Image (cartoon, helix red, strand yellow):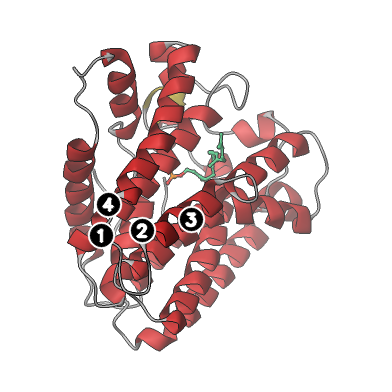
Amino acid sequence: MRRKSTSSSSQPGFDLDSFLTETSQAVNQALDRFLPRATTRPATIHKAMRYSLFAGGKRMRPALCLAAAQACGGSFGSAMPLACAVECIHTYSLVHDDLPGMDNDDFRRGKPTSHKVFGEGIAILAGDALLTQAFEIAAQCQGWPRYSPQAIVLEIARASGSLQLIAGQVADLEGEGQALSATQLRYIHERKTSALLCCSTRLGGMSANCTPAQLEALTAFGYHVGLAFQVIDDILDVTQTSEKLGKTAGKDTKAQKATYPSILGLDKSRKIAAALTEKAFAALAPFKGKAAALEALAQYLLKRDR
Ligand code: GRG
């Protein structure tokens, strides 16, 4: 997968391209091990789960998880089950988001959506199975002195439940065609996007048995990166082609969705994304230079073009 150059990263010595290549490959291999084989009965559901999971996502949530583990002196190996769990949750949310009853989209990750290939019923079940798979993977983690497997499962359940991820989707659906304020939009972004990105970052720290102060710093980092991520996503929706994004561009305007560009314009939206990223950088101060990967990721997410 070709990536935009990251040479503007605030830690010039850090090779983000190599980091992303290494983490994506390791995550793909681990996911392949965690999931039932495509031939395992009933084969249709396992084919559908694998189809969406291996369709070519950017693996940003796992990358944040692994980078956070590294910042706290942990290992990729310890963090890997949690990185895989968040990618399963994320993929489930995309499969369901694309369904006719939600955004009704035909393309995702550069391929026809799950319901286009397998039919609506199997797509719903594939999303359900990916969500459940995430908890199966996370529940098998070793646990750490400060963070039991129960604490890890609770962390993921809270981020993906009806107060966060689902709440964001509900507000997003109910907000279609409405003139939302910037505050209402922030509520949606905090939940539908930032919650899982923040959870991914926190889980990485937890897998390194991070201190409460480190967890607090990772929370502030993940929260702001998550918000910036959605502002950029909204900008890309109006500035990029469907081919580039691997999903249908211009959907927000068509669905009459309030976005930062529609409320505040592109220039102001770009400034907001940059300011949010600055806040994310500031949160990394306690790591005293040990968070090069997190810093480079935040910069990359701000500058991304897909
Ligand atoms: C639970 C049905 C349901 C939905 C929850 C996450 C979500 C709400 C809906 C998914 C669609 C959406 C626009 C989510 C916001 C987060 C976002 C911008 C997702 C796209 O993430 P990328 O760009 O995707 O990391 P890839 O494909 O690269 O992994």
Sequence-earlier tag: 2 or 3: 2
Q: Dot 2 corresponds to which residue? A: 149
Cα distance in 3D space between marks 4 and 3: 15 Å
Q: Dot 3 corresponds to which residue? A: 154
Q: Quadrant of residue 285?
A: bottom left
Q: Dot 4 corresponds to which residue? A: 81
User: What amino acid is labelled 2 in the image?
Assistant: Pro
Secondary structure under badge 2? helix
Cα distance in 3D space between marks 1 and 4: 10 Å
Cα distance in 3D space between marks 3 and 1: 15 Å
Whole-percent x, y for residue 103 in the image:
60, 27
Mark 2 or 4: in front is 2
Sequence-earlier tag: 4 or 3: 4
Q: Measuring 41% from the left and 36% from the top, which residue is drawn there?
A: 132
Secondary structure under badge 3? helix
Mark 4 or 3: in front is 3
Q: Is residue 57 left or right of residue 238?
A: left
User: Mark 2 and 3 residues: CB-CB less than 8 Å, in contact?
Assistant: no
User: What amino acid is labelled 3 in the image?
Assistant: Leu
From where the camera sits, is residue 113 visible? no
299 or 137, which lies in front? Answer: 137
Mark 1 or 4: in front is 1
Sequence-earlier tag: 3 or 1: 1
User: Mark 4 and 3 residues: CB-CB less than 8 Å, in contact?
Assistant: no
Q: Measuring 22% from the left and 55% from the top, which residue is drawn there?
A: 23
From where the camera sits, is residue 3 visible? yes
Sequence-earlier tag: 2 or 4: 4
Q: Residues within 10 Å of mark 2 (few under 14, many from 20)?
A: some
Sequence-earlier tag: 1 or 4: 4
User: Mark 2 and 1 residues: CB-CB less than 8 Å, in contact?
Assistant: yes
